[in-house]
Image (cartoon, coloured by chain):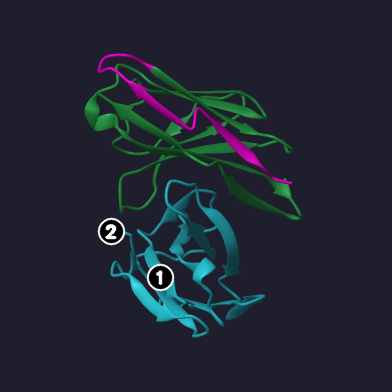
Amino acid sequence: GAVVSQHPSWVICKSGTSVKIECRSLDFQATTMFWYRQFPKQSLMLMATSNEGSKATYEQGVEKDKFLINHASLTLSTLTVTSAHPEDSSFYICSASGYIRGSNEQFFGPGTRLTVL
Amino acid sequence: SQKIEQNSEALNIQEGKTATLTCNYTNYSPAYLQWYRQDPGRGPVFLLLIRENEKEKRKERLKVTFDTTLKQSLFHITASQPADSATYLCALDKDTGGFKTIFGAGTRLFVKA
């Protein structure tokens, strides 16, 4: 149980285009979903926190107009990278949190590798 | 400012030995600390969580200690195996008792057969 999926697993796009990444909790309801970005050999950096049905909370330095987050249901959150540029190339990872096994745990998706040409 | 430090140098050990990884933090008072495993190109996988009032926690070959005075956690893998080779991440809740998780950069472990 407690599986989180991401789609696509990798994507290559041209500079200036927008890319949407989906994050789904497959077998539990996620009250909160988190989006992280990870550059090579660096730590996961929290970008934003989203709760179902409300606006996402962005971390300092993360442009909310560039990284659009929609948490439409308790099992789905999407991250759209708008007008992507090469510096947006990174590994994007989502996590979902729900009350499972008596505590709030975070479960991570497998990540999405974004390459912007 | 808040900081999590993990040894950036890779740890190389022989199969069967105990691997010990260190996580130090400053300017935090976390309610709990977590350890994750991350394989290349994959998302982190949760291993263990230890709370501020716990000194030690074990799960199979894994052991975690948490010293809130030293602001340090040690992560041990006993009887290590080549399959244990991965990057191990330390993580803290960003706001005491809060919900956001902040990660260290991780330590790469290589276990030689």
Label 2: few (<14), some or many (≥20) within 10 Å? few
Question: Residue at 62% of width from left, 77% of height from top?
Answer: B61
Asked whether residue A17 is in view, the answer is yes
Magenta residues span A1-18
* Residue at the image position 56 percent from the left and 37 percent from the top: A33
Q: Which residue is mark 2?
A: B1
Q: Quadrant of residue A112?
A: top left
For label 1, the SS is: strand
Q: If you read the primary sequence from the N terminus, does the residue marked by circle 2 or circle 1 appear first?
A: 2
* Side of A39 where B75 appears, left or right: right
**Can residue A71 be found in the magenta stretch?**
no
Decide if residue B37 is on the left or right side of residue A91. Answer: right
Q: Which chain is cyan?
A: B
Q: Quadrant of the N terminus of chain B?
A: bottom left
- What subunit carries mark 2? B
Q: Position of residue A110 (x, y in %)?
A: 52, 42
What is the three-letter code of the residue carrying label 1? Phe
B41 over A13 or under it: above or below: below
Residue placed at 36% from the left, 53% from the top? A43
Asked whether disc 2 touches disc 1, contact meaning CB atoms under 8 Å apart, the reply is no
Do marks 2 and 1 share a subunit? Answer: yes
Residue A73: x, y in percent?
65, 24
Q: Which residue is mark 1?
A: B110
Q: Would you say residue B72 is visible in this rendering? A: no
* Residue at point 44%, 74% (across, down): B111
The crowd level at tag 1 (other Cα within 10 Å; few <14, some 14-19, many 20+) is many
Which amino acid does the dot numbered 2 rest on?
Answer: Ser
| Residue B27 in the figure: left or right of residue B79 | left
Eyeballing the image, is B24 above or below A42? below
